[in-house]
Image (spheres, grey):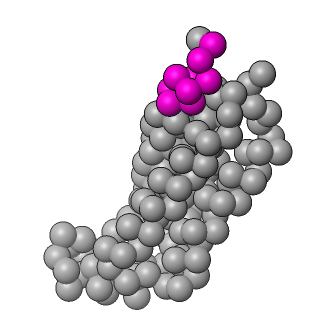
Amino acid sequence: MENPTVRGVIATLIGILVAGLVVALAEGAGHVIYPTPEGIDITKPEDQLRLMEIIPFGAKVAVVIAWFLGALAGTCTARKIATVKWPAWIVTALMVAASIGTTAMFPHPTWMIACAVGLPLLALWIAGRLVPLRA
């Protein structure tokens, strides 16, 4: 596949898929380590408001680690496939949007909101150093 635009679109789609899969797996592992507290129903708005107050700090860290690992895996994948930079940037932008969307669903600590923006950008920077664009 010689067309850089076609390769870029494929790289973007696969990068997004990989990022989402890694986030799901990492958050799933976090939920195994830190299960939802007894008596909390995350489908109820009043329980969502209380959730961040009662879950352990480690559970919050597990979530931001998942965001970072997903962004890193997705951007590395996009860079490995693509011959241009924009697919990794799109994966990063979508990871930022998804993380911010998560923090907007119910109150999160300020540091988690900062991580929602900063960690995908850090992942993009690291991916740029780890994975050269395909020639």
Quarter of the image with the N terminus is top right
Residue 42 seen in the current view: yes
Q: Which residues are magenta?
A: 2-11
Quarter placement of the C terminus = top right
Is residue 83 toward the left or the right of residue 30 in the image?
Answer: right
> Is residue 5 a member of the stretch shown in magenta?
yes
Residue 103's spot in the image, x, y percent?
41, 74
Q: Position of residue 13 (x, y in %)?
A: 46, 33
Residue shown at 18% from the left, 69% from the top:
43
Q: In this orientation, which residue lies closer to the viewer: 67 or 54?
A: 67
| Horizontal arrangement in the rendering, residue 10 relative to residue 72 (left or right) | left
**Visible in this render: residue 33?**
no
Residue at the spot 36% in from the left edge and 75% down from the top edge:
104
Residue 66 to residue 81: above or below: below
Residue at the image point whose x is 64% and y is 29% from the top: 82
Give the answer, above or below, for where 101 lies relative to 132: below
